[in-house]
Image (cartoon, rainbow, N blue to C red):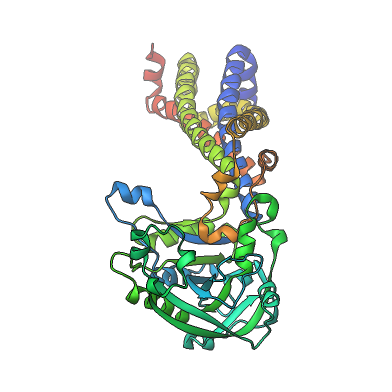
Amino acid sequence: MNNLTITKLNIWRKPIKSLTLFLIIFLLITLVSGALSIQSAIQNTERNLRSELPPMATLIWNAQEAERASEGWQWATREMIEKVGSLPYVKAFDFSLAVNLYSDSLKRFNQFRENGVELFSLKGINNSSPIYLQGNIISLINGRFPTQEELDKGLPLAVISRNLAVANSLEIGSIISLENKVHDIEKMISEGIMDPSFVWQKEEFILARRTLEFEVAGLFDINLNSNYFESETGMSWLGTELENQIFIPYLIAEDIFNFDLVHASDGFRIEEMYLEPVFILEDFRDFCSFSESAVEILPDFWEIADLSAVFGPLLSAMNNMEWLAYLVLWITITSTVIILSLLMTLFLRERRAENGIYLALGKSKSSLIGQTLMEVLFLAGPALLLALAAGHFFSDLLSRHMIEQTLLNPERTMDWLLYTIPFELTLFNPGMMSIEEMIAAYDTSLSLSTILSIFGLGLFVILVATIMPMAYLLQLNPKKILLIK
């Protein structure tokens, strides 16, 4: 008789033992299938969600870890930003420096001060096509941004919003004058002045001043519809701030910072520049690789952050579930090898006489191992198919229930999101996903590669558990096998 005929006879001859082996394989591989299905669902969901986000990233300082290591606060430096920006995953990058100037003639759009003195935020840029423009935060409607050559020379050119221009009757080529003032903060505090805007014009509180003039080179509109600062989100102030934002060359902003530093009173000098780096990636799928590569070249306690906090609650729930699935997977694999090995050892002991006779009659050990594997795989095949379906079904129900319980239990508010989105990326924020959207986004579909992985891992574990006891037993000669009690 050939091995296939012997396999069929052995299975049907002892149906209870065959059914026991089938059920054990089914139950154990169901757990393996469930754990791998959950891991696949987490990867699918995170990939789908990240594909909906702008592929933006920035640098953040891990203050908690630094504090534990007794390290003081650090700011991102130009060298760090340029080093990260040179990585192959980066499509474009820019870093800006925000400074403040004053004016008693230029009016802010949609915001007016009673004392007639306005404070304007100027953002020094390094890129002739700034990140705000590339990220569709603003659209250039007239004129241009300074060329790279003009930026490198630090020419006094400015790009302002159309609304700010209309509010001040400005156009392309107009000259705007702003004052660079350094105030005596120490004196203000000593006299109990809580709002510095009331004394901005008083000479006794001014340590140094100069007038800077800029030519309006371009006008922009902001794109409110696609951003988080729409009025109903409670973040409309961001839109107003951007309307009054003035873009200038970085070198001029750096000069303003240094002017303030030199003339500020002792104890109130800000010596470190707060640079705002933003990186645009070639592909959203590059984020993990980009993050790992960047962390390797950054100083300790620096990390990479993106906009994934918009689905932060779901990401947190999936991370916890992924850890649990990973634990279940390795416990199940270990248990499967141990249980099936012990079970196969018992079966082989019962058939020791049969195997000894086969060997005595000249049947090769490899042929005997092949026959035993055929019997196991004959039962394991249907068990794997059923386990794949059952594992996926139960993992879908269980993981969805766990996610729903996690997301629906705590109260999620906009305040939570504000503190988790890096400030540098706030304007790129597409808005927080609702709990319902997060639940609907959970994708448990199985790809062909996942199905093959489940089958491959299941077969590998079964083969290892089968071959180990066979290899030990068949090391003995036929006489010793027959004498085993």
Residue 480 location (% of width, % of height)? 36, 19
Residue 360 or residue 23, whichever sits in front: 23
Quarter holding the N terminus is top right
Residue positioned 34% across, 61% down in the render: 299
Q: From the viewer's perspective, is 270 left or right of 142?
A: left
Is residue 281 positioned above or below 331 on the image? Answer: below
Q: From the viewer's perspective, is 159 left or right of 270?
A: right
For residue 2, say whether it is visible. no
Residue 96 or residue 262, whichever sits in front: 262
Is residue 371 positioned above or below 40 on the image? Answer: above
Residue 192 or residue 53, whichever sits in front: 192
Quarter holding the C terminus is top left
Q: Quadrant of residue 9?
A: top right
Residue 362 location (% of width, % of height)? 48, 28
Residue 435 location (% of width, % of height)? 66, 39
Residue positioned 29% across, 64% down in the render: 267
Residue 205 location (% of width, % of height)? 39, 71
Residue positioned 62% across, 41% down in the render: 41
For residue 241, say whether it is visible. yes
Is residue 269 positioned above or below 289 on the image? Answer: below
